Image (spheres, helix red, strand yellow):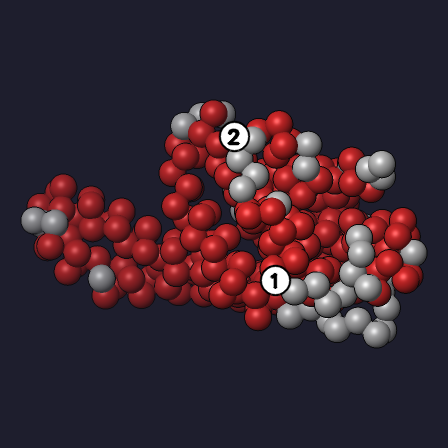
Amino acid sequence: MESAVQKDTARYPFAGTRYLLSHPKLLAGVLCYVIIGIIFALVALIILLAVALKPQAEAFGGEVLGWLLGTIAVFVEAFIIAMIFMKLLVSTAQEKLFVKVMKLEGCWNDSWEEPTMLSNLICCCNTTLLLQMVSLPLNLLPVIGTMMYVALNAPLASWDLMSLYYDSIGMNQTEQRRKVLGKGCSKINLSTFFGDSHFRFGMSATFLELFPLVGPTLFTLGNACGAALWACDIVRASGEEGVLTGHV
């Protein structure tokens, strides 16, 4: 029988943000990563405007339309570069938050390996980031487009976050993929999707990250806290033996 831990997973990203805001020391410890990311994004935009705008405007034929298209291209390029760099920084901050929250809750086992989210960028996060970029234009469609974007990104977003826990207990990538995406990675039935704990968790996490400014910063960090709170509930529900062997 499915436990309450698995049924209520949509609440964890919201609970994670509340937890982060109620622990100012946690927020202060990772705020520097966000500040560095914002500064980098601004610097990248300024450099591209100074170096790449004129050549691209001329490539588009010059005049008003060419300069307009060149400006749009520069902003898109700056956004992509900043998004990749922010992903690296935020992944590091999420890793630190995850461990700190589990330790504060008394659910971290010293025999576990601390998660290294950056090591998963090739096999998981890169796919997540690519899917986010490709599907981002869906948000131009009011409501329906946003719902489609959230649904498409939910499974990988959940895996991205919960890999922090699964890595710690020694679960390999194949086992993680099967656990999050199902056997053969073929969860395409919507009824299966919405009944899945990882999908519900990923839906909430992805939705929160869409909010301007606070989404890529505060809510993204809150999602890591939410993943830690879910992991803590799994630990409490499973008992030490089940957790150490990776049976969740």
Foreground of the two, 53 or 180: 180
Is residue 111 shown above or below 206? below
Foreground of the two, 32 or 193: 193
- Label 2 environment density (alpha carbons within 10 Å; few <14, some 14–19, many ≥20): some
Residue bearing the label numbered 2:
147
Q: Residue at x 73, y 67 (%)?
A: 170
SS class of the residue under badge 1?
Answer: helix
Q: Real-space Cα distance between discs 2 and 1? A: 28 Å
Q: Quadrant of residue 78?
A: bottom left
Residue bearing the label numbered 1:
173
Q: Residue at x 17, y 48 (%)?
A: 67
Is residue 156 shown above or below 165? above
Q: Residue at x 41, y 48 (%)?
A: 133
Q: Residue at x 21, y 57 (%)?
A: 53
Foreground of the two, 203 or 242: 242
Q: Quadrant of residue 207?
A: top right
